[in-house]
Amino acid sequence: PSSMLEVIAMTSEIDTLDLTSRVKDVLQFHNLGQKLFGEAVLGLSQGSVSELLSKPKPWHMLSIKGREPFIKMHLWLSDPQNIDRLKHYQSQIKGRCDSSQCKWCLS
């Protein structure tokens, strides 16, 4: 699929409560903040992410636009390198990434 809308169109109903619970668990387990996750994965502010994770609306009540962050969360959870990518993004923000030896920057 080439666009987010195509992904959404092909996606069957997502259990938003279960999804957000799993995302929160993974973030907490790896000591990664919602702000970082929001910026890197969802492209949303910390406030928006906090709202989505704490009070997810049921899938059928969401507009196409409202479903996008949940699709992104679903795709992120499905990515076996999701934590490494997020930690790399965090390193870049903090200026700690040595891009000459970084597998993410070199690829």
Image: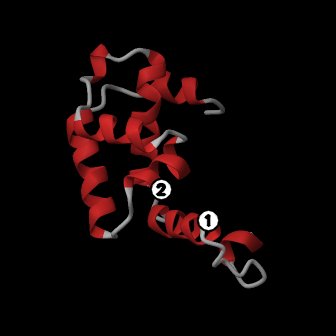
Residue where numbered disc 1 is placed:
93
Q: Quadrant of the N terminus?
A: top right
Q: Quadrant of the C terminus?
A: bottom right
Residue 80 coordinates in the image, percent (x, y): 45, 63
Which residue corresponds to the image point at 30% horizontal and 31% vertical from the top-left?
14
Residue 66 coordinates in the image, percent (x, y): 42, 22
3D distance between C-alphas at marks 2 and 1? 10 Å
Camera-nearest residue between 45 and 100: 45
Q: Amino acid at mark 1?
A: Ile
Residue 29 coordinates in the image, percent (x, y): 27, 68
Camera-nearest residue between 65 and 5: 65
In the image, which disc is placed on residue 36? 2
Image check: 32 left or right of 72?
left
Q: Amino acid at mark 2?
A: Leu
Give the quadrant of residue 105: bottom right
In the image, which disc is placed on residue 48? none
Image check: 43 left or right of 16?
right
Image: 16 above or below 34:
above
Element under disc 1: helix
Camera-nearest residue between 34 and 1: 34
Give the quadrant of residue 50: top left
Is there CB contact under 8 Å for labels 2 and 1? yes
Pointer 1: residues within 10 angstroms few (<14), some, or many (20+)? Answer: few
Image: 17 above or below 82:
above
Which residue corresponds to the image point at 46% horizontal and 17% vertical from the top-left?
64
Q: How many marks?
A: 2
- Sequence order check: which comes first, mark 2 or mark 1? 2
